[in-house]
Image (cartoon, rainbow, N blue to C red):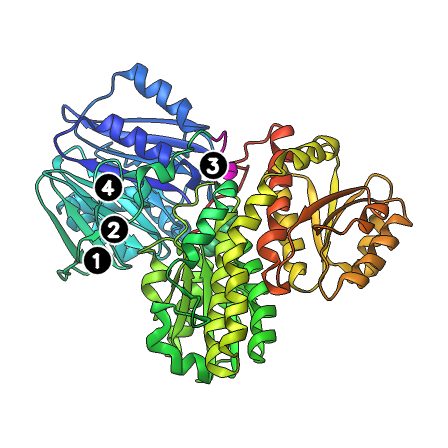
Amino acid sequence: MCGIVGYIGQKEVVPILMEGLKRLEYRGYDSAGVAVLNNGRLNVIKRPGKIRDLERVVADSGLNGTLGIGHTRWATHGEPNEINAHPHCDCGQRIALIHNGIIENFSPLKKELQRQGHHFASDTDTEVLCHLIEMFYQDHSLEEAVRLALAEVKGTYGILVISRDEPEVMVAARNGSPLLIGVGNNEYFAASDAAAIIGYTRDVVYLDDGEMAILTRNSFQTKTITDQPVEKTIEQITFDLEQIEKAGFPHFMLKEIFEQPETIRTTMRGRLLADEGNVRLGGLLDHMDQLLKAKRMIFTACGTSWHAALIGEYVFEDMLRIPVEVEYASEFRYRRPVLDPETVVMVISQSGETADTLAAVREVKKYRYPVFGICNVVGSTIARETVAGVYLHVGPEIGVASTKAFTAQVAVLIMIAMMLARRKWMSAEEGRKIIREMQAIPEKIQRILDQDQIIQELAERYHTSRNFLYLGRGYNFPVALEGALKLKEISYIHAEGYPAAEMKHGPIALIDENMPVVFIAIQDQTYDKIISNIEEVKARRGRVIAVATEGDEKIREKVDHVIYVPSTLDFLSPLLTVIPLQLLAYHIAVLRGCNVDQPRNLAKSVTVE
Ligand code: G6P
């Protein structure tokens, strides 16, 4: 959620913090702040709003130093104003602290600290940490005071702490919120996300829950929060700086939509064995017995990843004939899930940090059953805590509304199903046919992207609508959900996705000449049924936009607008049909003047419950 970055070394810290914050802004963008140590004073500057607002004030202030921390906030406790922005300080302004996560027992702690005379400046849960550390700092070092303070709190945190009295130290600690250390030459970085520091180093150490790091200008130490030393390995960041820049596109979201021919290729690269008609997913090979033995599967995820899981359910049940349940991670984690050795649980998460999905992983592990993961971010917590899994390999996704990760998740789920089906019943010939179709997907996506102008014109026509309905059947029912989610996320238009026939049980009451209805009406096995549903909408004067199969001229007579997608196998069609819906949402949001990459109230990676 929030983004955090810190630096200790020889260089001027302000540009490092500002650059880091800009790269982290997608994680939270309601307010931001920095604290820099200079001449024995902690200088704290914070502002509500965007990083560029903070940047102006920081530039005017002439702030400088070689030790500092910065934070971009997504509010949980306390409204997004200057006072609640991080960094927060203790009463004596000796320490400054930034925090990502939630201190759940902040209320009793705050009361007790206030009783002892501590004065609180903000409404945040975070500030209790500052005062707790202050209390212990009277008789202990900063490191020790942080440790003692953390022993008092319940909740999640990734924190960085600096002190005016220990100008050679920065303390980092993690429990439930991502935190990594960047290792440089006589300099160290700390950040919630590798994107913040990739301009300076590729060598990183990922902290695990219950761990802390003590950084000085020329060394770093990792320990548990209970003071046991821990050996960590230095890992390499695998993406490049260009991948987190806009490459000439006005928004990351548009860049990521247009990247999809390439990202789908990368997701499949080296994994499709065309000659054998088979799939090879290295990460799962050691677990094939368990996967093949499975009599039931549970997919769990949040948001767009949950929609990908729904498509996975349809594919797995059809190809493998085993029952699949798809659960919201936030529900699954509290439901005492019914598990057994023949049930396989798979979690799907672009970021690999979503708090509910991570909790679902831990819930399953409590019963000592293995969990598999489908993640994009290499080294993310879920990727590290699952027994095995498959990476998407689509590079960093920065736009808050997920696009390229969605198509890659669907492609990975299809590849897993294929790999298992080939071991179970699927012939090599059938496998080769599917693989040929999969290999053609990137070029087919490109053909849809080439129609961007048509979709833009549709957006111009409908961007003032107040409601949208998205309808689809079979494999494309989850795509209808995803199309509606994309639109509401970034344009703030109310949109609902429904299975097309289910429309008759409620949404049909909403239809009039002002209601645009987007139908995914490709020529698959549900085509005739969906045409009947289109008639039902037209009979009530709804405006119909159809996503149809190339060559289907007849549909033009029935609907107001058509966007064509190339034909493919039914279960691969979501990889194509979702593309126009992503573009439609994007253009509508731009025309409405919305901040596409940073939609209000949302965050890229939801690391709180
Ligand atoms: C947030 C993002 C969504 C994303 C969801 C799940 O809500 O805005 O785009 O689908 O989290 O994230 P994950 O990283 O677990 O896939």
Q: Are marks 4 and 3 in contact (CB under 8 Å)?
A: no
Rounded to the nearest whole Å, what is the CA distance between mark 3 and mark 1?
A: 38 Å
Q: SS of the residue at dot 2? A: strand
Rounded to the nearest whole Å, what is the CA distance between mark 2 and mark 3?
A: 31 Å
Q: Is residue 356 left or right of residue 241?
A: right
Sequence-earlier tag: 3 or 1: 1
Q: Where's residue 38, x and y in %?
A: 17, 25
Sequence-earlier tag: 4 or 3: 4
Q: In the image, which residues are magenta?
A: 249-255
Question: Dot 4 corresponds to which residue?
Answer: 161
Nearer to me, 176 or 138: 176
**Residue 351 visible in the shown view:** no
Question: Dot 1 corresponds to which residue?
Answer: 225
Q: Are marks 4 and 2 in contact (CB under 8 Å)?
A: yes
Near mark 2 (Cα within 10 A), the count class, few <14, some 14-19 or many ≥20, is many
Q: Are marks 1 and 4 in contact (CB under 8 Å)?
A: no
Q: Is residue 57 left or right of residue 63?
A: right
Question: Dot 3 corresponds to which residue?
Answer: 252
Residue 290, numbered circle: none
Q: Is residue 439 left or right of residue 54?
A: right
Q: Are marks 1 and 2 in contact (CB under 8 Å)?
A: yes
- Above-or-below relation of 99 to 573: above
Looking at the rendered image, the disc whose residue lies closer to the viewer, 2 or 3, is: 3
Sequence-earlier tag: 4 or 2: 4
